[in-house]
Amino acid sequence: MGAAGRQRRIVRRCPAAVWPLHSRRGDLRGPSRGDTRRSRGGGTVSQSPPQGAIAEFAGAEGLIAAVRAARAAGWSQLDAHAPHPVPEAAEALGARAAPVAWIAAAAGISGATIAYGVSWYLSVHDYPLNVGGRPPDAWPVFLPAAYIVGVLWAAAAALLGMLRLNRLPRLHHPVFHARGFHRASQDRYFLHLSAEDPLFEPEAALDFLRGLAPLRVSVVRAA
């Protein structure tokens, strides 16, 4: 092969394609209204305002006694979390039967009454028809529609009422950030004092919870 057919090799310096990029320090966030704490890097990381205080107990007896003590001390915004129903704790919290049944009954009666009234008005006044010689106000004819509408309204009201009373849909709650709270569905019992309570002060709430002989106490924050 001649010189024209030979492959030529070009030798030159090739600069690095990508310069090394180091991650930024995680403590370079700006200040906020919340408290601050020292990070491992030596800086400060902002904290969200406290949402409450929580205490962890090993058994239901400790939770029941803690709820009763909190009620006796004047706490009104508190809640208990347990892996199974604890009727004594619910009674101490002042829990009452949910009015879902009354909401469903009122909606069902209202829906049935409206459906019956509309059917009667259409058949008697708006567009009366002579069907087989039957009178326009034959009430048995209006019952199926009234029954169906009443059932639909009652079911919808029961669902919406349940969601409203439980403040749903809410897929997240600050208490989920509490240390060890995942065991509330396994073998631990928790008493949560909300920051919405007029008595709430972070240190005072923690001191009160420590006096109830819990396994652990901590401040609840949003993140």
Image (cartoon, helix red, strand yellow):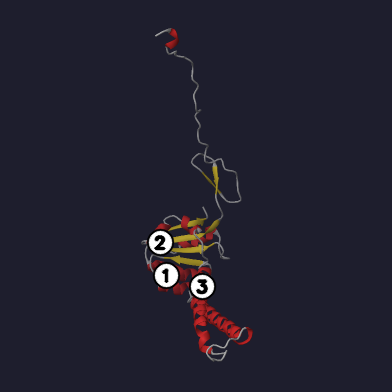
Classify mark 2: helix, strand or loop: helix
Q: Is residue 214 left or right of residue 163?
A: left
Against 166, residue 135 (above or below) is: below
Residue drawn at x 50%, y 77% as measured from the top left: 154
Q: Which residue is mark 3?
A: 156
Query: In the image shown, does 45 or 75 lie closer to the viewer?
Result: 45
| Spot occupied by residue 95 in the image (x, y as percentages of width and height) | 48, 74
Q: Which residue is mark 1?
A: 64
Q: Which residue is mark 2?
A: 184
Query: In the image shown, does 169 or 1 lie closer to the viewer?
Result: 1
| Spot occupied by residue 6 in the image (x, y as percentages of width and height) | 42, 11
Query: In the image shown, does 164 or 73 lie closer to the viewer?
Result: 164
Task: Give neighbour class at mark 2: few <14, some 14-19, many 20+ (Cα, 10 Å).
Answer: some
Disc 2 marks a residue whose amino acid type is Ala
- Work out whether mark 3 precedes mark 2 in sequence or the reverse, and give the earlier one: 3
**Residues at marks 2 and 1, CA–CA distance in whole angstroms:** 15 Å
| Spot occupied by residue 178 in the image (x, y as percentages of width and height) | 46, 56
